[in-house]
Amino acid sequence: MVASPRPGSPFGRPSSSASRTKVEEDLHEYAGIDYDKVTIKRNPSVAVLYEEALTYEEGTVISAAGALCAYSGKKTGRSPKDKRIVREEGSDKDIWWGPVNTPLDEKVFLINRERAIDYLNTRPRLYVFDGFAGWDPKYRKKVRVVASRAYHLLFMRNMLIRPTEEELENFGTPDFTIFNAGEFPANRYTTGMTSTTSVSINFKRNEMVILGTQYAGEMKKGIFSVMHYLMPKAGVLSLHSSANEGPDGDVSLFFGLSGTGKTTLSADPKRALIGDDEHCWSDSGVFNIEGGCYAKCIDLSGEKEPDIFNAIKFGAILENVVLDEDTREVDYSDDFLTENTRASYPIYHIPNAKIPCIGGHPHNIILLTCDAFGVLPPVSKLTPEQAMYHFISGYTTKVPGTEDGIVEPQPTFSACFGAPFLVLHPQRYATMLAEKMSQHKADAWLINTGWIGGKAGVAKRCPLKYTRAILDSIHNGQLSQAEFENYDVFNLQVPKKVANVPDEMLDPRKAWMGTPEEFNASLRSVAGMFTENFKTFAEGATAETLAAGPQL
Ligand SMILES: Nc1ncnc2c1ncn2[C@@H]1O[C@H](COP(=O)(O)OP(=O)(O)O)[C@@H](O)[C@H]1O
Ligand SMILES: C=C(OP(=O)(O)O)C(=O)O
Ligand SMILES: [Mn+2]
């Protein structure tokens, strides 16, 4: 008879005090984890994590396709207002302080850290994952995740790069540690706390502490912030972009704020996936930071997005989705808990993923904007100066759900198409991008995956099949040879024809459902928003970049 590998069985027995592992010793010494009371499981298998989550985490079930369906509680999106960075001597001048990076006293960080560790010590079981961020061995960072929920550990097992047995054996001291005590709240009366949620990063201690949110995305985006701090210092550009590679080895980068299509559009059966969200561009090319993908799955369909749909199987996590009680089939159209339903899966769940996730220097730079006013064309070709202007502007829309408190599409300017994750001033990243683009002669395109023909609520988002057709034309070289028309006010070069896209879709004026007067008013109003927003960046920008913006 085969024994059931459940906790309590011989397989689940805690290690005896005579044989402490190095990780137990480390966590005891370094963080005060009480290994006499707490069973520590390091890098457990997917099967063990499933069992633990199903046994101990209320509501967790398995979907018909074999994914672990986990629930993150009250917070189902990131909490940018509760993110803090410890202000220490030396980092003061470097960090882009302001609404994105709110300073925190070191002492308060330690209070939160102790609160988190005190909580973790009340748990009978803790899970540890040791893995890497960054596929290029030259730049990769060793990351340790310490979490009280098996779901959180499986998430980071999917999202970080999984070490080989040998790498795990020789892991040594981590470069960065996340303490996830998200089940337990922050204390609102602690100086500097404004809610019961706190996500704080300390670059001196190389630690991140999470309290009061169980949204797993905080961990992966936290590591992204760390890379946004460390990589530029090493001469490497960190990017909020997805990346894929054509059969001839041509790499495309897709920049975009959350919900604008990085994950969806980089999953392309004609191209090998390098990664869906976080990359770095070094002197030798691009590399993915992560070992997995994190797709939005609201309204996901097997017909429209087969690669993502089929990646949701054993090993994948589905977050905050609604299922049929009997069949355990997921209803992807149900936004009962949140519109930000998510799937996390290791990159090898995508059949044509490129592993290791490394590519050459990009040929095409695609800026994914998501225009809620319906005035930007679905595609336009950018001059290098326009690429800089639009990269720094980061005009787009916050889609509902991804951030706490966003309930309807909200136009925003998110510098570098990822302001919430920037640590240094946007100009630092933009300057590096301009240098790399000119050195490697990359073409730049602006693609509007947002509303066409009217504003959000009135019109519809550009149909996915047309955005895909546009990308096909970019990748087969047709679009750079197309005939272009100048699109006034923004001075964008818009192709007259794109294969498999109706002509009238290409010109927002023709697609417009209201009156020409309304269109012109909207166009000018969006242009005005650009000009107003760019005022804060005018000082650091070149005259050419400044002139590349809309002209009223
Ligand atoms: N034209 C389009 N291009 C890309 N995505 C679109 C488009 N229209 C609608 N969508 C939807 O928008 C969402 C994009 O999400 P995702 O690819 O996860 O964004 P990101 O990875 O940038 O956060 C998906 O739910 C997708 O189905
Ligand atoms: C996980 C996130 O990223 P994205 O939506 O870009 O995939 C997020 O913004 O919380
Ligand atoms: Mn994504």
Image (cartoon, grey):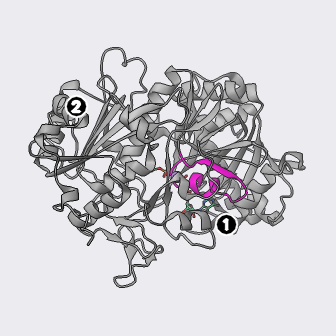
Residue 384 image position (x, y, % from top left): 74, 32
Mark 2 highlights which residue?
26
Residue at disc 2, secondary structure: helix
Question: In the figure, 68 relative to 372: above or below?
Answer: below
Mark 2: few/some/many CA within 10 Å (<14, 14-19, 20+): some
Q: Residue at x 85, y 45 (%)?
A: 480
Q: Is residue 443 left or right of residue 202?
A: right
Residue nearer the viewer, 421 or 151: 151
Q: Mark number for residue 463?
A: 1
Is residue 108 in view?
A: no
Q: Quadrant of residue 172?
A: top left
The residue at 49%/60% (across/down) is 296
CB-based contact (under 8 Å), mark 2 and mark 1:
no
Category of crowding for the residue at label 1, using alpha-carbon neighbours closer than 10 angstroms: few (below 14), some (14–19), many (at least 20): few
> How many numbered marks does the figure carry?
2
**Extreme residue in the front direction:** 1
Residue segment shown in magenta:
257-277
- Tell which of 217 and 429 is nearer to you: 217
Label 1 CB less than 8 angstroms from ligand 1: yes
Q: Amino acid at mark 1?
A: Pro
**Which of the labelled discs sits on residue 78, or is there none?**
none
Q: What x and y, as percent, mark residue 61?
A: 32, 71
